[in-house]
Amino acid sequence: MQTRIGQTCLFAVVALGLVVVFAGTTFAQPGSSNLGTWKLNLAKSTFAPGTAPRSSTFTNVVAGAGIKTTSDSEAADGTARHSEYTQVYDGKDYPIPNSLSGDVSAGTRIDANTVTFVYKKGGKVTVTTTNVVSSDRKTYTITAKGTNTLGQTINSVAFYEKQ
């Protein structure tokens, strides 16, 4: 009888410990409001002339202390772009391969649903964005301003929907 009570108590302690560990991991995940797959809604978005893509989808997942983004888009001229990179929202520059915004980006978390990014090419700021996930976590709006690596003026509001 004594052993059974001891086993039950040990099980309860281990179970409680696992709940605390997993809950802590979930709440500590960086950028958790922007996780998932997001698809561009062109009808609700606005772009500077000549800069609107035909389509764009990206997926954000937790990767260590950061967020791994996998992005696929099709430019107005039909050019397909694929990019994968990991960003930590610590204000430091991280490489962004195959991006028209720049070769590095520094992300900074403003609040639970907002992140800003400063893109650079050759150390010079090219584009800045403010990325906001709605409170219901169903939409993701990216407001971008600057000049991309092709020399095009960027002044856009891209409206993404959770998939």
Image (cartoon, grey):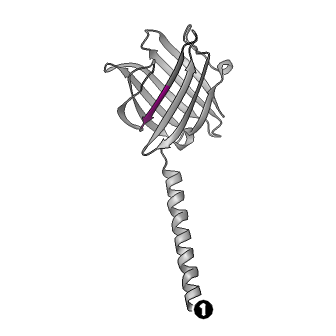
Q: Residue at x 50, y 21 (%)?
A: 144
- Assign a secondary structure to mark 1: loop
* Percent of width and height locating residue 100: 45, 17
Depth check, front residue: 104 or 44: 104
For residue 118, side relative to residue 74 (left or right): left
* Percent of width and height locating residue 5: 58, 86
* Percent of width and height locating residue 127: 43, 20
Q: Residue at x 56, y 91 (%)?
A: 2
For residue 152, side relative to residue 159 (left or right): left
| Residue 136 higher or lower than 124, as above or below | below
The crowd level at tag 1 (other Cα within 10 Å; few <14, some 14-19, many 20+) is few
* Residue lying farthest to the right in this orientation: 43
Depth check, front residue: 15 or 126: 15
Q: Which residue is mark 1?
A: 1
* Residues drawn in magenta: 83-87
Magenta-colored segment: predominant secondary structure: strand
Q: Residue at x 56, y 14 (%)?
A: 75
The image quarter in which residue 122 lies? top left
Tell me the quarter of the image containing the C terminus: top right
